[in-house]
Every structure is written in C-alpha cells, then in structure tokens.
Amino acid sequence: MICNLVCNYINELIINNMKKSLEGSSKNYNSETVAWLEKNRDLSDKELLKRGAEYKINKKGDIFLDLTPEQMEEIRCMEDRDGALELVKTNGYYLKLLSPELQEDEEIVLEAVKKHGGALKYAPNHLRNKRDVVLAAIKQNGSALEYASPELRFDEELIKIANF
C-alpha cells in the first residue's frame, strides 16, 4: 500500500527540480546530462520529487536524491514485502531505510544489491556471508566487496570478479 503511494505519484516537475538542483553546481551539467537524467530516472524518484524530495549535489559533485523526513519515515514503516521489493528494485539504497524484518529478507537484499552494489553495507551479517548476494553486489559495483563478510572479502575468485 505504501509503495503504491510512493510509486504512483507521476512527475511533471522532475526536470524543473533537477534544473533547480543543478544550478550553481561545481560540475558542468549540460542539457545532454539533464536529458540523460530525465530518461534514466527511477519511477520512485519521479514520485518522491513530486512529494518534496530534491536532487542535491554532494561535496564530490555527485547527484543524489534527498528525501524528506516524512518520506524516510514512510519507508521505515513499510510492512508490505512486495512493496519493499519493488522499492529496492528502483533504488537499492532504500534497503537502509527498511525495517529490520524486511532487511532480513534475502530476496529483498538480493534485488537491492543488484541495483546498487553498495547497498550490501545495509544487509545483515548473515547475508553478507552469502556468496550469491555478494556476487550480485560486486557484479554491480566491485567496491561493494568491502562490505562482504571477512570470509568472502578475501575470496580470490570474488576479488577477481570485483576487478581488484
């Protein structure tokens, strides 16, 4: 139900929000970059932007979606497993905000790390020790290997896959 609320707000404001957020940036974002962002944005991003989230730029110059406290609380209170699964498919880092019960769900964690390997950081320890979860994370982002369990972090095959 909450995912429907989060996932059913369709945007018309995203480009205006992105342009506002990108103004004054230290990076040079041209119209091609903005067009690429529009085309590749996540459905949840569109809806969250319409409800008050904003694109911001961190000190490194990377763009991120800054959620409102209310939006973060909606995600934290989510109890719907299917909704949570759909949510992490759009942005794996939402795993961080899910309840501990949903963070324990292997399928949810697997989908989260497939989208953003670094989401492995928010997985429970027993799932950081599962080879298939770690493999999915490092295929998406080799640097995610640092969040694997010590046993897997030093696995030669995984190190090769992560390109270290």
Image: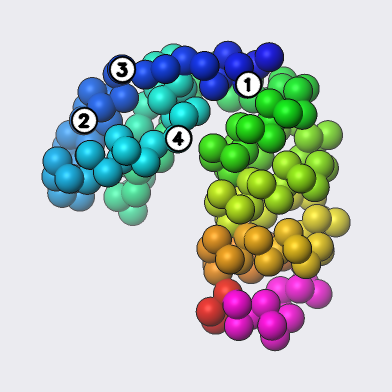
Q: Amino acid at mark 3?
A: Glu
- Bin the neighbour count of mark 4 within 10 Å (Cα to Cα): few under 14, some 14-19, many 20 and up: some
**Looking at the image, residue 136 lies above or below residue 160:** above
| Between discs 2 and 1, the one toward the N terminus | 1
Q: Which residue is mark 2?
A: 19
- Bin the neighbour count of mark 2 within 10 Å (Cα to Cα): few under 14, some 14-19, many 20 and up: some
Q: Secondary structure at mark 1?
A: helix
Q: Secondary structure at mark 3?
A: loop
Query: Magenta stretch containing residue 154, yes or no?
Result: yes
| Between discs 2 and 4, the one toward the N terminus | 2
Q: Which residue is mark 4?
A: 42
Can residue 164 be seen here?
yes
Q: Quadrant of residue 14?
A: top left
Residue at left 69%, top 35%?
85
| Between discs 2 and 3, the one toward the N terminus | 3
Q: Which residue is mark 1?
A: 3
